[in-house]
Amino acid sequence: MKIVVIGGTGLIGSRTVAILRRGGQEVIAASPKGGVNTVTGEGLKEAMAGALVVIDLSNAPSSDPQAVLEFFETSGRNLVAAEAAAGIRHHITLSIVGTDRVPDQGYYRAKVAQEKLIEASGIPYTIIRSTQFLEFLGRIADASSDGSVVRLAPGLLQPIAADDVAAVVAEVAFDNPRNGVIEIAGPERAEFNEIIARYLKGIGDPRKVVKDPEARYRGGRIEEKSLVPLGEARLGRISLEEWLRRSQKGA
């Protein structure tokens, strides 16, 4: 089976491509550097010729809210048009748990727009909403730092390893389209500040972590369960401590 992975060279994409290729599938790891650009439409027709499944793991190159929105809307429209022309049977998009629960966060609003585009496309689809990746905990800590103190909004976090995300994405590629959403999360749920404190301790970072009711997450205000699944979710297997051990071993 031919599968096109948009963003196939990124954090999740490269892992997903590797899993699918080990399984004997024909996989196109699509990226702008490889001549496939979802914003301009370049290379989409050629990449999708003969494909049955498209997995969209793309990410906006900018953090500006308007630029992110324009990226996902333009990219989504071009993908939908190319998929319809190619007769794609299953479109899979990776999104974020809670994307519809943090309305004042620009990136989340853009992901909502992306989801709506797919839902209205008429192409059979599955949206996979994931919690934050363990690989991003360092960025979260840095973005929340005030000198030697990391200030975090109250709330829960249930981060998942990129390897676990890729495993689920690859598995869904062989499932029937849900025409709906599935959610995935890490094996452990804990307070935001506790997760980050454990991460920093694990890497030997002396910064102090505090819970701050006035803190924001990526510019948006969050509630206790804004970033975790509210119902059933597929859980990854790799804990924070196991992920830290693997990361340090591979460093």
Image: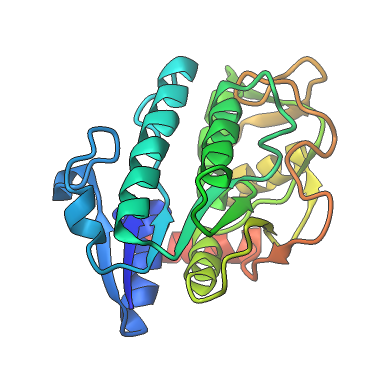
Total labels: the figure holds: 0
The structure residue drawn at horizontal position 29% and vertical position 54%, both measured from the top left corner, is 9
Along the viewing direction, whichever of 209 and 17 lies nearer the viewer: 17
One can see residue 167 in this view: yes
From this view, report whether residue 66 is shown above or below residue 180.
Answer: above
Q: Locate the N terminus by quadrant.
A: bottom left
Image coordinates for residue 111, horizontal then vertical, percent: 55, 35
Q: Locate the C terminus by quadrant.
A: bottom left
Q: From the viewer's perspective, is 192 left or right of 25?
A: right
Image coordinates for residue 53, horizontal then vertical, percent: 40, 65
From this view, report whether residue 19 is shown above or below residue 197.
Answer: below
Q: Colour mode? A: rainbow
Image coordinates for residue 137, horizontal then vertical, percent: 57, 42
Q: From the viewer's perspective, is 184 left or right of 142?
A: right
One can see residue 141 in this view: no
Along the viewing direction, whichever of 160 and 102 lies nearer the viewer: 102
The structure residue drawn at horizontal position 75% and vertical position 32%, both measured from the top left corner, is 101
**For residue 179, what is the image quadrant?**
bottom right
The structure residue drawn at horizontal position 58% and vertical position 53%, both measured from the top left corner, is 127
The structure residue drawn at horizontal position 60% and vertical position 42%, both measured from the top left corner, is 200
Along the viewing direction, whichever of 35 and 206 lies nearer the viewer: 35
Image coordinates for residue 25, horizontal then vertical, percent: 31, 79
Residue at the limit of the structure toward the bottom, as seen here: 24
